[in-house]
Image (spheres, helix red, strand yellow):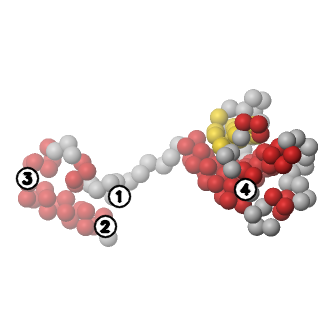
């Protein structure tokens, strides 16, 4: 319905102002921003947005993740992702083959492992059996 109103407005404006509208470089008056089609986000931008949203959700569940950041880039050996637990950062490889939420649901546990006692002692056996001890839902 908004598009129909915008098009009606454009037709009316064109009739009233004649060639002025056609020569005008100001596109925003004729095409309100909410009507202009948006281009899809590039995959890297979409991944970054999805990763940040997933991490925000996980932070709300696991308070130990406060201050952790996530970014998309190149991992040292082409891993899907790397948790830099001492730097409070998770790096997801831009060529990842697993969805970012699944990646984060694994990588956060390396950071929680470190923050739990200052040691990485769970290895790849994450989440631990007592994972609910770290949740705000417990």
* Residue furthest top in the image: 76
Cα separation, mark 4 vs mark 2, equals 43 Å
Question: Which quadrant would residue 90 be assigned to in this image?
Answer: top right
Instruction: Return the x and y of residue 59 as percentages of the image width and height.
Output: 69, 55
* Residue of label 1: 34
Cα separation, mark 1 vs mark 4, equals 37 Å
* Residue of label 4: 63
Choose between 60 and 116: the one closer to the eye.
Answer: 116
Question: Circles 2 and 1: CB distance less than 8 Å?
Answer: yes
First-in-chain label (1 vs 3): 3
* Residue of label 2: 2
Secondary structure at badge 2 equals helix
First-in-chain label (4 vs 2): 2
For disc 1, the neighbor class at 10 Å (few under 14, some 14 to 19, many from 20) is: few
For disc 2, the neighbor class at 10 Å (few under 14, some 14 to 19, many from 20) is: few
* Residue of label 3: 18
Choose between 22 and 100: the one closer to the eye.
Answer: 100
First-in-chain label (2 vs 1): 2
Residue found at x 68% / y 32%:
74
Q: In the displayed structure, would residue 136 be above or below residue 112?
A: below
């Amino acid at each position: 319905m908004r598009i129909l109103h915008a098009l009606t407005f454009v037709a009316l404006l064109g009739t009233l102002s004649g060639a002025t509208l056609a020569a005008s470089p100001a596109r925003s008056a004729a095409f309100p921003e909410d009507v202009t089609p948006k281009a899809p986000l590039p995959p890297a931008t979409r991944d970054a947005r999805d990763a940040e949203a997933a991490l925000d959700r996980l932070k709300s569940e696991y308070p130990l993740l406060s201050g952790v950041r996530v970014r998309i880039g190149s991992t040292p050996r082409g891993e899907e992702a790397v948790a830099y637990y001492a730097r409070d950062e998770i790096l997801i490889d831009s060529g990842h083959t697993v969805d970012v939420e699944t990646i984060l649901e694994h990588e956060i546990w390396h950071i929680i492992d470190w923050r739990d006692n200052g040691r990485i002692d769970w290895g790849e056996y994450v989440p631990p059996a007592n994972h609910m001890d770290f949740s705000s839902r417990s």
